[in-house]
Image (cartoon, coloured by chain):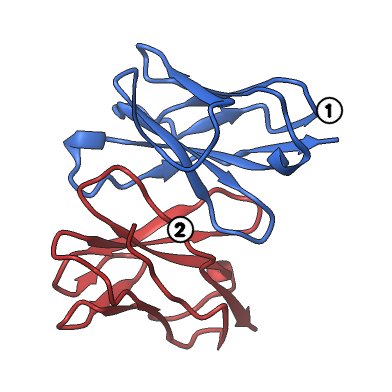
Amino acid sequence: DAKTTQPNSMESNEEEPVHLPCNHSTISGTDYIHWYRQLPSQGPEYVIHGLTSNVNNRMASLAIAEDRKSSTLILHRATLRDAAVYYCILKNTGNQFYFGTGTSLTVIP
Amino acid sequence: ETGVTQSPTHLIKTRGQQVTLRCSSQSGHNTVSWYQQALGQGPQFIFQYYREEENGRGNFPPRFSGLQFPNYSSELNVNALELDDSALYLCASSLGYGDITDTQYFGPGTRLTVL
């Protein structure tokens, strides 16, 4: 199972962009990079995923390094509702998601 | 479109007892995965069911077992409960082999407390 490394916690001011980093130096060529977030007292929620190219959706952007050994989840304007634990996960052709301990994001009003 | 639902929401059991947790998958999904999330930790993969067959298992003992039904709903059974089984149990459904990325959609979880 491929491993990811994330900071334990980060803070951001409301309405400002947030860049959440993730290192995955052991990534293989077929691993997709997934991001999920877990709001308090809820199950994890899909945010975004990518393979090689940067990705954008209505929730966030995913920037993937050229060597794919790291990625960054970008929230363009943090809101109080974005306060959550963010998980970076590598998913290969197998059937298991391996969650780490994630990054706890605090948004300051 | 109905999302993933789980029942019950909360449950209290005593050590040595058995428990059954239930999950209804999202419409159109044929794959269900179960996770255990201890307080302050990320979810840990227990097992996955695809079309009623176990399709992968994490590092959990055999007293953790499951079922998937023809309508793709699922049960997680835990026998001989231990204090360390106290956790949030999450169910997630996905398209499985119909989606190479296997994006998973989680339910709200069942909070199990073992006394």
Q: Which residue is mark 1?
A: B14
Placement of B47 over or under B78, stated as above or below? below
State whether discs 2 and 1 lie on one chain.
no
Question: Which residue is more in the foreground, B11 or B76?
Answer: B76
Q: Quadrant of the N terminus of chain A?
A: bottom left
Q: Residue at x 50, y 84 (%)?
A: A15
Q: Which residue is mark 2?
A: A99
Q: Residue at x 34, y 71 (%)?
A: A60
Name the element at disc 1: loop
User: Looking at the colours in the rendered structure, which chain would you say is drawn in blue?
Assistant: B
Q: Residue at x 69, y 55 (%)?
A: B39
Placement of B39 over or under B33, stated as above or below? below
Disc 2 residue crowd, few under 14, some 14–19, many 20+, Cα 10 Å: many
Question: Which residue is more in the foreground, A37 or A1?
Answer: A1
Q: Residue at x 31, y 47 (%)?
A: B103
In-image side of B3 versus B98 (left or right): right
- The amino acid marked with disc number 2 is Phe
Residue A81 is tagged as none
Image location (x, y in percent) of residue A29:
13, 65
Image location (x, y in percent) of residue A64:
23, 78
